[in-house]
Image (cartoon, coloured by chain):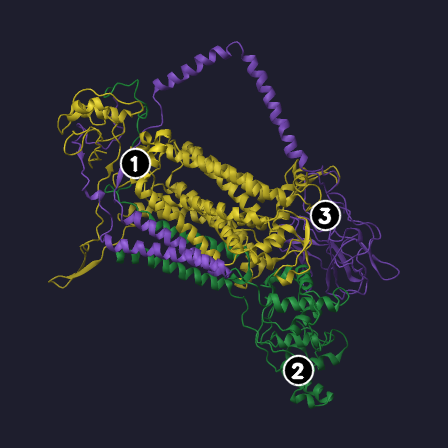
Amino acid sequence: MVDALYNWFDNRLNISTGGRKIVNKIFPDHWSFMIGEIALYSFVVLLATGVFLSLYFVPSTATVVYNGPYTPLHGQVVSEAYASTINLSFSVRTGLLMRQMHHWAANIFLGAIVVHMCRIFFTGGFRRPREMNWIIGVNLLILSIFNGFLGYSLPDDLVSGTGIRIALSILESLPLVGSYLAVFLFGGKFPGTSLIPRFFLLHVLILPAVIALLIGMHLGLLVRQKHTQFRGGGATEHNVVGAPMWPTFMAKTQGFLFLVAGVTAILGAAVQINPIWLYGPYVPYHVTYAVQPDWYMGWLDGALRVMPSWETVWGPAVGGHMIPNAFWPAIVLPGITFTVLMMWPFIEARLTGDRVDHQLLDRPRDRPKRTALGVSVLSFYFVLFGASATDVLANYLDVSLNIVLVAFRVLVIAVPLVMYPLALKICKEIQDTPGAVKPKRHNIVVRSAEGGFEAVPSAGRPGDEKVELEPVSLDYAPVLEPAMAAAGGDGHGSVQVSAGTTAAAQAAMAAAASIAARGAAGKGGAGSGDGASGDGAGGDGDGAGGDGRKRGIFRIPRNYR
Amino acid sequence: MTQPGSSHGSGDGPPPIETVGYDAPQFQVAAAHPRRMEKAVAIAFLAALAGAAGFGAAFWVNADNFWLGATLGVTFVGLGAGFVAWGKYLMPRGPFSESRHSLVPSEEHKEQFVDEFASRGKVAIERRGFLLKIAGAGTAVFGIVAMFPLIRSLGPLPKKFFFSSYWYRGAYLVTPYGTRLQVSSMKPGGMATVFPPTDIGGPFSQTMLVRQGTADITTAPGRETWSPQGYMAFSKVCTHAGCPVGLYQQVTRQLLCPCHQSLFDVGPGRAAVPVFGPAPRPLPQLPLYVDSRGYLRAQKGYDEPVGPGFWERGNSNG
Amino acid sequence: MAIRLLRLVLLPLAVLVAAAALGTFVIGRDHVSAGSTAMENPGMRLTASDSSTPAQQLALGRTLFEESCSSCHGDNANGKGGVGPNLQGVGAAAVDLWLSTGWMPLKTPTLQPANKPPSFPPSEIRAIAEWVASLKPGGYPIPQSVNLAGTKEPTGFDLFSLNCAPCHTITGAGDALANGYHAPPLRGLTKTQVLEAIRTGPQNMPVFSPGIMPKSQALDVVDYVTKEIEHPTDIGGLGLGQVGPVAEGFVGLFVGVGACLLAAYWVGDRTVEDEDDTVKRHDEEEGPEPGDGDTAETIAPGGA
């Protein structure tokens, strides 16, 4: 039955010919390569829960009198957006769960993107030929931050409404076009009736489509250029070592999708997030304290707080001009941040003069300056992120608010300056110490006959040593034409090749054709010069024979890398 | 043929090619005790099944959010752990490898491609370059005007939007519930949010009214009549980023904006001057007077735009 | 295998969960140094001491004041420079509020007193309050009984959002004011205390007199505070102290992303140690030569 189904598709799409390439595709297995998958799968959760939410959410600022189950709001005039979100939370089965899962998944999505970006940065995965993927990734970060902001602003509650007001002031602070854009966005009268519907369209349709498109490009480039890998275990610049797509990677990645979804579900079950019924609807002359944005915008909020009160103004009251205070922390800072981020592969290439392809990743300690710079810059944004919670910290630590803010103003300069030499030193120390981050062996204390004590490493326990196996190559041989099967039994004679075979396989086939037995041929043999070290086509260990379609599995000898 | 790029090679000729049979350790499962691992995976999937059934039941009886989410979580974690354990421990342990090939094409291919592109293109474009230029110009103009509906149609022009004040001469100070405030309404130390009667609830006309003592206050030179009998009125829209400055500390006589902690001093002789935090300008003050029947009213509107700055805003008056 | 699983996965997981739970509860706890066990002040409730005459009440009040309060507030409650403020004219409600919350008395002067168990039983508090009120008219009397019949909690919510949320946060969690002061969390308060606070404006809190907040509105606010603020509707799970996005971000990052990273650590492999584990000084071997990936037609097999 499965056979019949497979044949139906195969005869229309020709899966079998290229399909081997797909199922044999190798994925390096390191755990840090899965951080991007955390982001990907939380995006899947976002899409699934988002569809559910969009069935019930009403993106309208038309007012309605609330009379649902939440009694403290009875008789209050609220927007339909707010009322429908309350409805989702109290009246729709699994509505609250979907809301909370959606919001937690958004937080995890952005957290994973940032951690993923850091991993790529610290291991040099953005170097040639992967600059485009880095740029796409930074754009994904920007769009996701923005989409998250739009998403939590949709319910039109007091906390997110205050955030919208701040965002409009930031938009207004743009020179030349600010006041126009601000009025255009809210359609004339603040808050107006257009804001929530426009946010909804952006959040549900336009931005997810762009994000999905960029994710597709991101993954497509990854497939085309193949994933990078760490040294060790047979990995070189010319191969990819890891697990094949089928069945291992499919199983693991499928399982990981469920695990990420599971984490989101458990958080959605156990920890409350964005309880908008406690916040009440947005009223332009109401405000609350402890009003921070979601964490991924915290660095912007912190920047707004620690910025000194500078403002540039010139000219008379009417006819003069001003660069408002909010322009610097909210427009210039993110502008510089994302521009430098996007340009980083090119900046580093220029600084190091390194313009060759890299398929192997650095260990962060091997590039102390880059690592230290990354740590330093990351700490800058981390301090800004902490600065968005000045009031909560002051309250919690029982310290004066003024002192906390001044402390953050100092820290935002001091911490990055301290972190750079610190990280640099740590990297260099790890480099210089053999076995620095490896698990330590136990020591046995031995007493000598003279009375002195000596510590000697104990032998490893059986089973401690991880057995290092050679990677087995799955490069496939081209399918031999049936006519050649008989003649090609022992690999002699010329062979026809189907179009599209690689030079590797061709050369290897030719090599196999000229190799009667094991052993080296000339320079032209055994995969020379084509990046497929040690590979060859031919039969299996029993010798070529049979129907010629048998595919041998080959191991790369350790000393030929 | 070029040498392999690797510098690791031993140098003299490629070594023997080895083949690996399907009984090699790379094809064995990774688990030391596959049967036990199978049981573990089976338990995980059974837990997922139970979780899914539980979710269905919880939904049916309209259970709390916690149970809905917990059952769903058990389902997902069960499925996830099962598949991962299966893939990690019950499948060929590997490692496997495949070759990488450079994505830089050879010179020959590059030349071929450019030739084909150019040769056919030559026929179409040569001596017709001016057509391309005209097409380009048309497309560029279209690109620009295509932005017009997308951007300009979004809303009206700001015109004097940011300069207008909804306050006017003689406006009563009205609470959001519609009460007109009189000079006896508020005790010293009190605070209220007020609006003009024509714009109750207005986001730009919102005003903070505070009372300090019962004597007239001069907040700044030239403002001797603005604060009668201890009442002072300031715009509630923060000059930093527009949040309502709703927090009044009556002992320290400060207005604190909760968003970014801009602190405005409204003590004696101080007209909401920013003393801490990022706010760059004082809050505009609304001049008040007490009419013959004791009502608090505005002498005139704000004499400068309220709220955060924008490009067209010059120096404030006074 | 099982031991490895235990060591590599369960132990770190357990540590993480424990840390996260600890962090959640630590953040989630109210920032109140001591829970207020304020007792309901019943106003004119009959007590043993109530059988005394008003004059005896005043005498009791004065005695108590001299014992416990006059060292900072002066013998006639008219203040002592730099230590305790003048209490003449503050009214009985203010005294009742400060004593029943335990803010007063203090051993040493401090910027803003914190909640603690009251030092006097309600009858004595009332006596002190009446004596102070008798010195000079002014202020607000102790509310007789706070009757919440007919109050509208939604109106209270709206008024709370307008007047109280900017300092106390919309969930009543409390927050830091400027210059070292705090707006305390609104938990563990009686109806009387809430009403007294609204009317007397303790310390930095503004005074909401009947002219700007009529009695019905004030009672609405009391209703909302003692119901919804005291017992928030946390149907979504752990409330994290109702602090909002700060706590949620902490949980999302450390618990959410952390758990996913732990899962990734289980699913994926560790770095395999390279036997050639010396310091790499960027002698990168080059990648595959250009032309490796070309299709076959124009290149002779096995040729140069």
Q: Is residue C181 above or below residue A350?
A: below
Q: Nearer the viewer, residue C41 or C228?
A: C228
Question: Which chain is rendered purple in the image?
Answer: B
In the rendered structure, find residue C65 and report the number of the disc placed on it.
Answer: 2
Question: Which image quadrant for residue B48?
Answer: bottom left
Are the residues under marks 1 and 3 on the same chain? no
Q: Residues within 10 Å of mark 1 (few under 14, many from 20)?
A: many
Residue flagged by tag 2: what amino acid is it?
Answer: Phe
Mark 2 crowd level (few <14, some 14–19, many ≥20, 10 Å Cα): many
Which quadrant would residue A359 be assigned to in this image? top left
Using the rendered view, name the quadrant where residue C178 is placed.
bottom right
Residue occupied by mark 1 = A24
Of badges 1 and 3, the one in the foreground is 1
Q: Mark 1 lies on which chain?
A: A
Per the model, the C-alpha gap separating discs 1 and 3 is 66 Å
Mark 1 to mark 2 CA distance (whole Å): 88 Å
Question: What color does chain C have in the rendering?
Answer: green
Chain letter, disc 3 residue: B
Q: Nearer the viewer, mark 1 or mark 2?
A: 1
Tell if the residue under mark 3 belongs to the same chain as the one under mark 2.
Answer: no
Q: Is mark 2 on a helix, strand or loop?
A: helix
Query: Which residue corresponds to the image point at 68% horizontal and 44% vertical from the top-left?
Result: B309
Q: Indicate which disc residue A227 carries.
A: none
Left or right of C18 in this view: C66: right
The answer for which chain carries disc 2 is C
Quadrant of the frame with the N terminus of chain B: top left
The percent position of residue B195, horizontal first and vertical second, equals 76, 54
